[in-house]
Every structure is written in structure tokens, then in C-alpha cells.
Amino acid sequence: MSQRTVYFLSDQTGVTAETLGHSLITQFDSQDFRQVTLPFIDSEDKAREAVRKINQVAESSATKPIIFSTLVQDDFRAIVRTANGLHLDIFDVFLEPLEKELNQKSTQTAGRAHGMSDMASYMRRIEATNFALANDDGAITRNYEMADVILMGVSRSGKTPTCLYLALQYGVFAANFPLTDEEFESGTLPDVVLKQRHKMFGLTIKPGRLQQIRKERRALGRYSSAQQVRFELREAEKIFQRFSIPYVDTTEFSIEEIASRILESTGVDRRVRP
Amino acid sequence: MSQRTVYFLSDQTGVTAETLGHSLITQFDSQDFRQVTLPFIDSEDKAREAVRKINQVAESSATKPIIFSTLVQDDFRAIVRTANGLHLDIFDVFLEPLEKELNQKSTQTAGRAHGMSDMASYMRRIEATNFALANDDGAITRNYEMADVILMGVSRSGKTPTCLYLALQYGVFAANFPLTDEEFESGTLPDVVLKQRHKMFGLTIKPGRLQQIRKERRALGRYSSAQQVRFELREAEKIFQRFSIPYVDTTEFSIEEIASRILESTGVDRRVRP
């Protein structure tokens, strides 16, 4: 099958066009897609340049390019529309019904979605990221009082990336508490954690998968042995059950899925919207 | 103006519906939106439950809810469509033209976009996140050879969140090098950095904004004084210019924008697609 080029066009970052387009093209699994993002199309010249690039590819391929675009301004959209390809533009399709329903013309202002229009959101995300970093290590005293959620699990169960994703995507303050021999031996949790019991959420993972992940970090030794991995996961689940901590098996989940399930289960609000 | 409830419906995380919907509703700035995500609608029961929730709000409000949905399966979509609201569904609109152009039926499989369908992508994002964390601190020796890009700037210019975003969103290996008195005094950069000169990218920021950010961290002292902030930023820009390092002023930019501009300027490929 010949390769199909997919373009993501945007007057801003291209994140919306990429997210939208990716959701759709992943529904066609036997295709060979080449994905190209053309961001910051914020002038007529850049719109024409994008058309030139797309037409060049269209001429030299057996297949028509697919163009996902999120251009806010009518005039740039009109230029891009002359490109040779299948055009799928969310503003073309959805803006009119929204304007009608809201009984208001859209502002046609670029850069609203991922721009700095909302300084408070930006600061919140930065603060949440710093919070996740400061509360990621076992050694220091943590600000569990400030946390929206406290993720718990054994080493490499996915706590850190999930905390960072919750911070960057949703501005949620996520701390993390690693379960180690100390907890497994005592069968309990430190008081400082237990005080925030309602915020706790556990991550578990299948032993085979955890072993694979740990081996990439340290190939030999107890840390990545089948026996140790099984022991830790079993003890961690006992703790989750003992303290009625909701938990999720992350083996089959992406970071987005883990994060969404945590928000759904805990009822923690998204502090900012992506 | 009365509040308008906006729903993001998904059989998966809701990230696509949120991103799409947010791009559109931010075009209507005088409206008061209440945003609700209903993720993981993966059964007829859950679809009916969503309809019930939406209709309840519709009945008690003066305005119709707006429903952004990304439900892949026809049967769940049919149930959700009975809810009282303005329906904007990307699969309704875009799937048919795509099927026609690709000459292939879509798989109608939920969870392709942010699912674990691609284990390699997941691992890449986790590795990139770990790389960003390991290469974030000035004290340790860095793996600059492995980096796709090395961000440079003074303290609190946005390096860390940007590195983490590049890792989580795009699987890009981003290291970071903080510019400190050592570089300002010598006017040069360490050899280990200079060897990777082609990977370097600078972040700068307006003095007033940096001072504001630093004051939140440490209110008093040299670190957040107007004089020190101005001095550091001036010296950092001198270094960027001396070594022909491309740089961007992040003052007006969101994390998404900074990341997109770095990828555009450096030509670094997105290793994974969101």
C-alpha cells in the first residue's frame, strides 16, 4: 500500500489538529500514514507556503494528502482550501452550529486554545509541575496537604509520568508515595500519608510487564527479578485493600488513560482545561 | 448571561473531545461555560447514564447543553444522540469522507488514539520523561549525546516544564542546561555542551515576568531582584547570540506554544504522536 501523507495545519501549535486527526486515522489500521505538522500559519504568506508544500507532495504521490486543519481566520482558511487534498477542518464544520446555538459570532482570534490568553491557567500548570517534581522523591517531607491526589505504587509502576501528566495537562497537584520494603514489612503506611487517606490512589501493573520495565533500568539483581517483582506487587495490593485505596492496573493503559481514570475515580476536578 | 454546560463525551479518556471542544468554545469569549468530561462510555448502560445526566441539566437550565463527542461505535453514538443538546461529533462528520478517500471501512475500535495499541510509543514517552528528569539538574553529568534538543536559559525561564511536555506529548528527549553565574562570568559554555551545539535552543523571558515568577519562589533577596533578573537575562541573550543559538521569548507563550516552536525551529521530529 502506498504511503499517505497526513497534514496537521494550525495557526497555533497544531495540538488540536494533531489530536483530532490522530483519533480519526487510528481507525484505519492497515494504512501507512506519514504525519506532518505545519504550525503557526498566521499570515497569508505562510498559508500559501503550506499550499505549495502540500501540492508538491500531492503531485509526487499516488494518493491525495489528507489535511486536518484548525485555522480560525476565514482568509487563511480560504487560501489553504485551494491545496490539493481531502480537507477536514473543524472550524468549517462546527463553528456555524455553535454560533447559531450561542447566538453570537465567534471572535476568529487565533491562539485562544493553547495561547497565553489565560495567564492563571499557565501559572497553575507550572505550579502543578513544580509540585509534582518536589513531591516525587521519597527522601523529602512532602506537602501532602496541598495535594489533590497522592499516587501510590511500587518503583516503576508509572507514578511519576502520571503525576507530571496530571500537572501539565490538567493543573492537578499530584504527589507520589513509593511503596518500599518499609511499608511491606510493617504492613502499614506513615502517619503523614494516612492523614490524607481520602486522596490516595494506587497503581499496580502485571509482574511480567514491570519486570520488563525494570530490566531496562537495571538488568540484573533483585530489583528486576521475577520473585521480587511478584512479591512487591502482591504486598502493594494488600496495602491498597487494607486501607480501601482505589487502584488501577496500568498494564494495558496509556498515560492519558491512567490520568483520566484517576480523575474519574477520585472526583478531582480538572483545574485547567487543555 | 446564564451558564452553559459543555459536555465532553468519549469511549476513552476524553482528551480528544476536550481538545477539540476547547478550541471551539474559546472562540466565544463572553460566554460562561461549565465544562464536564464524561469519559469511558464503553457500554450501552454508560451511554444511557450520560444521556440521563445531560437531560437533567437540560431540564433545569435555560440553555441547551453543548455536547462534544468522540464515540467510535455507532450503537453508543445512537444512544447519546437522543440527549437533549447541540451534538458535535467528530466521527459523525469526518469518518465518512475519510472512509471514502481511503477506500476502507473504519475499524470502529475504541481506544486507538490514547490507548496502549502502540506499546513502543508508550515506552518512548516514559523513557523521554525519565530522560528529562535525569537531565534536569545541574549537578550530574548529562547524556547530552542522547538528547534531541538541549534547552538553555536562566532559572525559571520555563526549561523544566517544556522538557517534560516535549517528553510526555511527543516522546522527544529534551535535556536542560541552566545558565548561571559561571557562564555569565566566563562568557562561554562548558565543552560538554558546546560539542552538542546544533541541539541547543534558548529560552528567554521579559524581566518583569521573570521577577514575578521568581518572587513566588523566593520573595526576597538577589534572586528575585529587578537588577539581578535584568542582568541574567541580558547575559543569557549575549550567550545565545555569541554561539548562534536560536531562542524564543516565552513571556507570551503557553507550554504548548514553546514546545511547538522548538520543534519547528530545530526540525526535531515528533517521536510519537499525541
Image (cartoon, coloured by chain):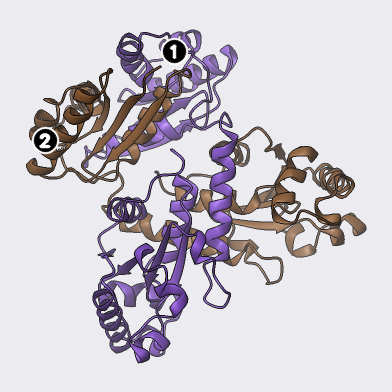
Chain colours: A brown, B purple
Residue A150 vs residue B3, the one in the foreground: A150
Q: In which quarter of the image is residue A88?
A: top left
Residue B248 vs residue B198, the one in the foreground: B198
Tell me the number on the disc at residue B106.
1
Q: Position of residue B133 (x, y in %)?
A: 56, 62
Residue A49 vs residue B145, the one in the foreground: B145
Q: Quadrant of residue B230?
A: bottom left
Q: Name the residue located 58 percent from the left edge and 67 percent from the top edge.
A: A134
Residue A187 versus residue A266 in the image, above or below: below
Residue B60 versus residue B181 in the image, above or below: above
Relative to A162, B247 lies left or right? left
Residue placed furthest toward the right:
A185
Quarter of the image containing the N terminus of chain A?
top left
Q: Where is residue B181 in the image (x, y as percent from the top left)?
A: 40, 88
Q: Name the residue located 35 percent from the left edge and 87 percent from the top edge.
A: B184
Q: Name the residue located 73 percent from the left edge and 44 percent from the top edge.
A: A212
Q: How crowded is mark 1: few (under 14 residues within 10 Å), some or many (20 or more)?
A: some
Residue B249 versus residue A249 in the image, above or below: below
Residue B25 vs residue B3, the one in the foreground: B25
Relative to A171, B258 lies left or right? left
Give the alpha-carbon distance from disc 2 to disc 1, as whole Å.
Answer: 31 Å
Type of the residue with mark 1? Ser
Numbered disc 2: what chain? A
> SS class of the residue under badge 2?
helix
Q: Which residue matches tag 2? A: A76
Type of the residue with mark 2? Phe
> SS class of the residue under badge 1?
loop
Q: Residues within 10 Å of mark 2 (few under 14, many from 20)?
A: some
